[in-house]
Amino acid sequence: MENAAIKLPDFDATVEPLNDELIDDPAIARILKTVRGHLGLEIAFVSRYVEGEQRELTHVSTDLELPMGPGFREDRENSYCWHILQGKLPELIQDPADHPFTAELGITDFLPIGCHVNTPLRLADGTVWGSFCALGREPDRSMNPRDLAILKSFAGLAGERIETVLERRICDIEVRRRVESMLDGHAVSIFQQPIHDLATGKPIGVECLSRFPDINKRGPDAWFEDGERVGLGTQLELTAVRCALETLGGMPEGVYAAINASPKTILSGDLRRVLEETDAANLVIEVTEHEHVADFTALARELDALRPYAKIAIDDVGAGYAGLRHIVDLQPDILKMDMILTRGIEKDPARRAITAAMVSFGHEIGAKIVGEGIETQAERDVMAELGVNYGQGYLFARPLPVVAARQHLLGNISA
């Protein structure tokens, strides 16, 4: 009869398979190996209780060839762990022969079990998740309550780690649900930030920027990071691309629209397929540089396939991963200087020198230069003096709703 004080999970519900993060967790592997070393035992393992009145081994540490390993399931009634939880066996067993009941359990002779130290693994709410166990194949009369206390200490560490991973898994499920709710595009809004020619002051383009429902709490970067975290990064980016393309009808002639895409999304080939289906003109694809690119050759090849549909810009030059050689390989039409180079450029000779070098570099490879984050007239004047072609920032306009952006463009073009 089960002890009423024991809080057990719902055994009628199917337990989710363990995710790779928990199965391959190096911390749990180290804990098991260390407890084996401290106790001088041959096997240590973690198990959990699952549906069908079974228990499942989740982590096993041993140097022996065993007939069972992670993922092995058996009736919980055949395990020492279950009967220890029920109070039928003690947590410290020096020799199974001291407890006649062990003779009824097939596992006693199957391994065989010689000595056994075990404690239940409980989560913070008191629920018994499984058990933490170490055993040897020979009886050991030297095992004592101190050894059990050591095992319990390590079990506490393992339980904390398991709970951390389980909580992260629950969080990931919620994050995935939240990201999936964006994929139909109905909740994604597009703002456009104008880009101006520094020589004439006229607008020559806009950057399309995604906005999500909780913009006051979490910025777009956080949403895209969440998408990447749960394996939906490319899908969310493509949703943003489609939403941006839907806003481009009626763009003034000669004004381009820039749309952001990560190297991963570009390399997937899905962006190319989306652009193949659009009739939008004057497009620019801005390659965001917030992630390491493992294969610039493959990226350059895919960008070449996009050129019939759009020009290519490299975003955040001066702060991203790509070096100048890689930028040359990508053959961009536009280089967007990171705003870190813009801030206070009128007072900083180093920033002016870097910007002048970037202008020269752009001239040599045939690329236009955009200065991002221009907020003051002084910054704008120095950028123009150094030969930067275009400017983007609050001095010209903040990101605007599409209708307001269109009014800004038309008003400044006709001025």
Image: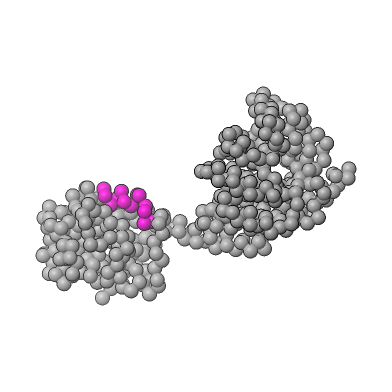
Q: How many marks?
A: 0
On the image, the x and y values in percent for residue 166 come to 42, 59
Q: Confirm whether residue 152 shows in the render.
A: no
Residue 332 in the image: x percent, y percent? 66, 40
Q: Quadrant of the N terminus?
A: bottom left
Residue in the foreground of this view, choosing between 37 and 92 = 37
Q: Nearer the viewer, residue 283 or 22?
A: 283
Residue sitting at x 72%, y 52%: 191
For the C terminus, the image quarter is top right
- Extreme-top residue of the structure: 349
Q: Is 289 situated left or right of 58 in this image?
A: right
Residue lying at 12% horizontally and 58% vertically, measured from the top left: 139
In which image quadrant can residue 350 be found? Answer: top right
Specify whether residue 385 is in view.
yes
Residue beneath the point at 84% across and 48% down: 410
349 versus 229 height, above or below: above
Residue 97 versus residue 336 in the image, above or below: below
Which residue does the image show at 74% across and 54% down from the upper left?
280
Q: Which residues are magenta?
A: 22-34
Front in this rendered view, residue 267 or 305: 305
Residue 363: image x %, image y %? 70, 31
> Please, which colouring scheme is shown?
one colour
Q: Is residue 271 left or right of residue 85?
A: right
Percent of width and height locating residue 77? 24, 72
Q: Is residue 239 magenta?
A: no
**Left or right: 181 as drawn, with respect to 38:** right
Give the main secondary structure of the magenta stretch: helix
